[in-house]
Amino acid sequence: MADRPQADVDTLLLGLDAGCRSVLDPLFEDGAVPNLRSLFENGADGPLRSQIPPWTPSAWPSVYTGVNPGKHGVFGFLTFDGYDWDVVNATHVRERTVWEILDYHGKSSVVVNAPVTHPPREVDGAVIPGYTAPEDPECHPEGLLSDVRAEIGDYRVYAPRDASGRDEKVEWYRRLVGMRGAAFRYLADRYDPDFGFVQFQQTDTVFHELPGDDEAVRAVYEAVDEQVGEVIDACDPDAVVVASDHGIGEYTGHEFRVNEFLREQGLVETTTEGEGMPTWSTIATNRLRKGESGKAEDEDRGPSVTARGLALGAKVGLTSQRIHAALDAVGAADFVAERVPADVARRAAEQVDFPESVAYMRDRIELGVRVNLAGREPDGIVSPDDYEQVRDDLVAMLSSVETPDGDPVFDRVARREEVFSGPHVERAPDVVTVPADFDEFLSTRVGDGRFGPPSEPYNHKREGVVALAGEGVDADADLAGAHLFDVAPTVLATLGLPAGDRMDGSVLPAVGAAGTEAYPAFDADERVATDDDDVEARLADLGYLE
């Protein structure tokens, strides 16, 4: 396919999840990624400031809508309805995407592997959803995935979960990257789109699953670079935009257990019964464990003896979190997770008791604390009259927290409306907590003290990358100050189209702006459930669910 141009894509957007100069520069110097290096050296490039929160499920929707989470409505991997939770999907993104705006202007798009795009909405062109989609996602148009698999041999959203050894993982990373490129080239040839977007997730995954493995990182980026070269050769784009959703770097700070701190302040109550937050134990029990009857062991007969024993143990500090830590140290955690009865792990887990607590962190990825507000939560205990005072108290107490080294844990603690704007601010945490330099790991765990070593070795950072190259691009333009929200209006400008007047970003100075337009209000479909145990388990594998 790469021998001759098969399509004439006007603008190509290349998404590098977690791409940043600290990772790219050594690869540039070693000549490992010549195609990416050429785009950066022959175009305009600079740092790209990410948003709050700088994580895939919220940041990529900001990239492709040009608005902050308060306008598009996604703040993390999870969405909440009372005390219940589910993984976010495209129906939670409540703003028009770039390709939907292009469809409005009569232009076509091919979008491959963009996160939080399942189920896809109809546009002129083709969409294969990415991260948070199920393994066999609905695509647009219907039946597209079968066509792609028939054409390129295989297409997966994720690697098999039983890929275990280091070499096997790296091989799967490379294969997945190859699938993205091959699928995009096939669809570009088939649909001849005006706009193309292909996103590579493995540039982030490798840091979470193989931390500190520079050779694995290089292998992933070499595979991405090969696909970038083949896509450009095949599609002959007039303009190319490279963007990442955030950067990545090692933790040198601490783990701060927000709910344990709030428990010390008398705001969090805990329980060893009930659902609580998704944790290792609840994800593990969702993964396994159904017997021939389709029910967890002893479901019809009440708690098993083992479950009652572990529940008793939890009351004296023997929680499933501690059990998992011990098992993990000897490589047995996954083995046990695949065999422990559901009621055993659930009853052994010490969790936040949401109905009985004043405030709590539900999801560390969304960077904030939620108030158990009466009239909003099913069993809220904070009176609306006391809501603002509770938030003031939370801001004051969290702002004053220091690490064991005497440094502030947070760069900023603020009310949500001071951080976000738009019609969906009410879906954000009530109080937003921004960790210092993103070097402090925030945890929802309770127990084991206020501080500990980070549970993950790498963390997302605020500084990603952006580069523009091709026709009409001023390669000498200064991109200092570029922000995540600027990508969507810039993409539209490369196509001579106005930015939406609801967008928070501006066209980057490397291309000429085309004004703004008041696009029709977003016609939101009903939100639907993801409710996919496999997707939840994959998030737990990457450390996004504790």
Image (cartoon, helix red, strand yellow):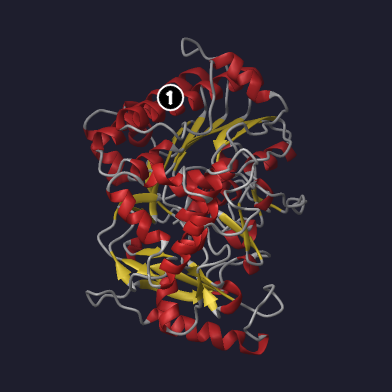
Q: Residues within 10 Å of mark 1 (few under 14, many from 20)?
A: some
Residue carrying label 1: 175
Residue shown at the point (27%, 28%) measured from the top left = 32
Residue 85 in sight in this render = yes
Give the SS element for disc 1: helix
Q: Position of residue 130 (x, y in %)?
A: 56, 37
Out of 423 and 289, give the one closest to the viewer: 289
Out of 154 and 331, give the one closest to the viewer: 331
* Position above or below: 206 against 189: below
* Position above or below: 292 against 517: above
479 relative position to 59: left or right: left
Q: Position of residue 184 (x, y in %)?
A: 55, 25
Residue 506 in sight in this render = no
Residue shown at the point (37%, 47%) measured from the top left = 333
496 relative position to 223: left or right: right
Q: Position of residue 79 (x, y in %)?
A: 61, 58
201 relative position to 297: left or right: left
How many numbered marks, from 0 up?
Answer: 1
Out of 371 and 289, give the one closest to the viewer: 289
- Amino acid type of the residue tagged 1 in the rendering: Arg
**Which quarter shows the C terminus?**
bottom left
389 relative position to 247: left or right: right
Q: Position of residue 305 (x, y in %)?
A: 50, 59
Out of 416 and 531, give the one closest to the viewer: 531
Residue shown at the point (41%, 82%) measured from the top left = 264
Residue 433: image quadrant is bottom left
* Position above or below: 284 against 384: above
| Furthest residue toward top | 3
